[in-house]
Image (cartoon, grey):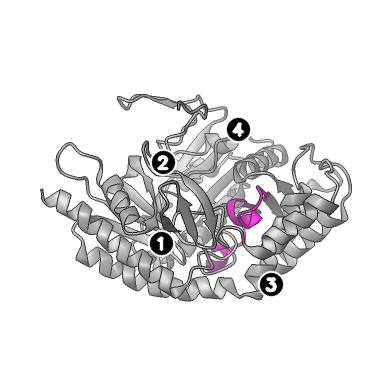
Amino acid sequence: MRTRVLRSSIGSEGAPRVVDGSGAELRLSNGRTVIDAMTTPAPLGHRHPRVVEAVTAAVKNSPTLDEGWESADREAAADELISTAFAGEDSWVGAVRFAVTGSEANDLALSLCQALTGRRPLVTRDRAYHGMVGLARDVTVQPQWHGGLTEPNGKISPVPLGTPVRTLPFPEGVLGSGLTLSRDEARTILAGAEPLLEDAAAVIIDYSQGGRYAAPAYQDELAGKARAAGTLWIADEVVTGFGKCGKWFNFQWGESRPDIVTLGKPMGGGAAPVAAVVVSQQVLDLIGNSSWQSYSALRAHSTAIAASRAFLQVVSEDKLVDRAHALGLVITDRMARAAERHSIVRRIDGMGLHWWIDLHPSGGGGPDSATRAATAVLEAGVMVATSGEANALLITLPMIISDEQLETVFQALDHGLTAASDDLRD
């Protein structure tokens, strides 16, 4: 039957449909159950009982209020977000504005920076992805995510930018090496940054897109240059926030603190769309007595607030950030061995439970090596994502994954990389 859903380029034609999910597993339309190693919006896996209970109670007992109305639950959610996820950041953190998606949170943050500075240009880094809405789309510079059309022959018709965007280089690391980048190396990478920042409203930096992970020295060097230029700095933690990379937020690997942090994807615990813009006390002071004229009927919906609060409580009480950090050390070692064993691997980088594997092109005229590897990984019982333009595998694991399930992931990954390596030799 012809589908009425207008598809994106994510996913592949003919792949089994997902029909159900529980914990770290998905059930496919062909009856198989596989481990979900590709989910960002479900950090606690699927149908976590505490999150389901909280959302169910909200549906039954809470009214649906537009963002403009006062809400005790919304106030409590903001307080819990600050006291739990931003614990120890008391002197920095100012206030929270909720959003529906990470794209919207980034658009809100960027537009606020333009309003506060009176400037229009924006600065991002190479291979960045910040979303598909408004200014967030403008600062998305990964070539495949342009918001427009890509024809079967590869011809790209992108959407024209709405604002001037400038791009900074960002270091490409291997196996978490961004954490060891020196300040001198960061200074060299950012040697030409000053003229790009000079009259910009904001510089926005994410910590995972394109397989480029946290580099604290880079962050700290950039923060100093941005402040000298009067440019506000936004840390996009939509993917990396809430502990998957071994700290509550990736900016915490560095010494500097951003002006604004944007949050999204995992924040709803896999049960509801919810995001947020968290502004520093300094930005709150810049807003002063002014009213930030941005409003939405569905931001901080009662079900989203309930899901977010339950998610934060589970992560904190179950010490899942510490577990992600510990598992990340194990995964780093296993990824290093995979890189040594498989000739198809060009580069592996990642942190905690979030990893990116660049592959060499496959031989012959068949599918690209990432698709071949992902297909074989699925055959072995694990579902991973691919990035076709980059010919890469993306592995992002739920925080509740068991040791046994993690071992299955690595066995399946070995099977998939072996299949892709065999194609390369052919």
Against 168, residue 151 (above or below) is above
Mark linked to residue 134: 4
Which residue is farthest left? 426
Number of on-image labels: 4
The quadrant in which the N terminus is found is: top left
Please say whether residue 262 is one of the residues in the magenta stretch.
Answer: yes
Q: Where is residue 70 in the image (x, y as percent from the top left)?
A: 89, 48
* Nearer to the camera, 350 or 274: 274
Task: Identify residue type, mark 1.
Answer: Gly
Q: Quadrant of residue 330?
A: bottom left
User: For this view, does 303 lie left or right of residue 18?
Assistant: right
Q: How far apart are marks 1 and 2 (CA)?
A: 22 Å
Q: Which of marks 4 and 2 is nearer the N terminus?
A: 2
Against 295, residue 259 (above or below) is below
Q: Earlier in the sequence, mark 1 or mark 3?
A: 3
Magenta residues span 249-275
Q: How crowded is mark 1: few (under 14 residues within 10 Å), some or many (20 or more)?
A: many
Q: How far apart are marks 4 and 1 (CA)?
A: 29 Å
Query: Which of pointers 1 and 3 indicates the residue nearer the eye?
Result: 1
Label 4: element kind: helix
Residue at the location (83% across, 48% down)? Answer: 288
- Marks 1 & 3, CB-CB < 8 Å contact: no
Please say whether residue 15 is one of the residues in the magenta stretch.
Answer: no
Mark linked to residue 11: 2
- Marks 1 & 2, CB-CB < 8 Å contact: no
Mark linked to residue 350: 1
Mark linked to residue 380: none
The residue labelled by disc 3 is 88
Query: Which of pointers 1 and 2 indicates the residue nearer the eye?
Result: 2
